[in-house]
Amino acid sequence: MEELSELLLQRRRKVDALWEAGINPYPNNFKPRHTSADIIATYNDVETLDASDDNLSVAGRILARRSFGKAAFIQLQDRKGRIQLYVKKDEVGDEAFAAFETFDIGDIVGAEGFPFRTKTGELSLHVRTIRLLVKSLLPLPEKFHGLTDIETRYRQRYVDLIVNPDAREIFIKRSRIVNLIRSFMTSRDFLEVETPMMHQIPGGATARPFITYHNTLDMELYLRIAPELYLKRLVVGGLDRVFEINRNFRNEGISVRHNPEFTMMEFYQAYATYEDLMEFTEELFCHVAQDLLGTLDFTNQGLDISFQRPWKRLTVRDAVLEYGDIDARQLDDRDLAYSYSRSIGLTLPEGISYGKLLMEIFEEVAEHKLIQPTFITAYPTEVSPLSRKNDHNPDIVDRFELFIGGREIANAFSELNDPVDQKERFLAQVAEKDKGDEEAHYMDEDYVRALEYGLPPTAGEGIGIDRLVMLLTDSPSIRDVILFPQLRKEAK
RNA sequence: GGGCAUGUAGCUUAGUUGGUAGAGCAGCCGACUCUUAAUCGGCAGGUCUUCGGUUCGAAUCCGAACAUGCCCA
């Protein structure tokens, strides 16, 4: 038997009393014809409301209540916002008013009435009828401070959404951002597709996968770490421009920038290069920012950020030279570069390859300083097993990553479409895996077979949607832009 | 995985040197027909995250566990 506090028992007794009086506390026969925003939009600028005999109806949750014996104001919240209701005993009748007096903050009600302005000028609904639609059993957080405990905000996001308008606003903006991206892609003649989330061979990224199991097929499956290899199979199949906005899963640490499942848009365009995608990315991001924020200049965590084009472009090497305390002669010499890595506090394996060493140094000295949008190019071939080698220098690939606010936001490259080269790169990855690198790529024979049929020259890109939303909503943690972020089991 | 911090009523919190927990909001009862954190009077609400230790005595000191946050890996 669950022990309930007096507070909770009181609410349950109210429900029992309703059932005993023959009243269903959870009816579903009220259809609101208006929202709070409809009413404000229609009447806010109307001078004289007294003569209005419009009959409006709204439904929503009671957030606050100010009673005066035979009349009361309540604040109602619906999906569009909040509106004040004025309930007067003379207007609704003795019986309905008596019922109204039992309503609690948190209850959901339906009301009909006419618009009017209070003495202080607030547009409100003068209620003719009001009734209970849902009896709430749990008390809401207090009205002034709201819910601030961050753990409860994540665990009980439904409460957060009720009482914190800022939280609601972030998720409304998130939806708009995704819609803007989708319509932009569609307007450029990209086809939206859905590829498998459960992979027999996890591929397309350097990451550890989650493993699951299919009973009937009696086999292990991996939650996808990226859709890349499937999307490129579609380009082989003649779907020359495709995109997918969906979840990826990576079995790695959790931080303010990482959630085990996160949303990525990947897209592939045949007959394009990674340089074309830099232009494309600038256009896409500017389109989204302009529509969402009305500007290309905004702040993120106290930093001024500008999307004004063109965006800076730097090679990995030049970024290290610009932001690190090392000159070209040292950086280009493997042993001197290794010494430098030690001097800045990195402890890397003695035998680390030059490419990996360069990337470690880049991440340490440059990444967090890339505040304004910056395309970093010329990645080492060995850390880019799916990218096309540069025509003039086979040690680097035609790839960029986009950094904004010190965070990686996107990753793109001209695709490796030489099946022989691809097979060799997979074999190199398998060798790394055999040496104990759990993040190294798996061999995917079918993907190589697809390339043997011929992948058109193509460029592709992945954009981290959660991080983009963080950027555009000025959110400090990825958990602020994911409705239900991953947490440990709740303590009892 | 490591370091630091936090955990008190439904929510937001106070709690001094160790002496058996105090408030605001929410709730309940009462008054009030234009409030905006409404106001006024009264009442009730606590296994101080959990387990163990020190002590005559622990919310407070010590240890461990659990959860969360930040930083690092």
Image: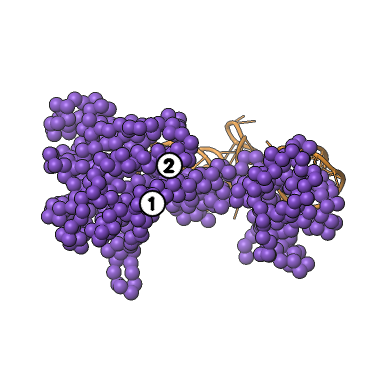
Residue at image coords 34%, 72% = A215
Q: Residue at x 78, y 54 (%)?
A: A128
Q: CA distance from mark 2 to mark 1?
A: 14 Å
Q: What residue does disc 1 label?
A: A186
Identify the image's colour scheme: rainbow, by chain, secondary structure or one colour.
by chain
> Quick one: SS at disc 2?
helix
Residue at 29 percent of width and 66 percent of height: A220
Residue wearing tag 2: A288
Q: Are the residues flagged by discs 2 and 1 from a single subunit?
A: yes
* A6 to the left or right of A262: right
Determine the colour of chain A.
purple
Q: Please, which chain is the residue tagged with disc 1 on? A: A
**Residue A272 at x, y = what percent?**
25, 46
The image quarter containing residue A312 is: top left
> Residue at position x 44%, y 31% from top?
A297
Q: Position of residue B52 (x, y in %)?
A: 50, 51
Secondary structure of the residue carrying numbered label 1: helix
- Left or right: where does residue A12 sit relative to residue A388? right
Q: Is residue B16 left or right of residue A96?
A: left
Q: Nearer the viewer, residue A288 or A303?
A: A288
Q: Is residue A371 visible?
A: no
Q: Colour of chain B?
A: orange
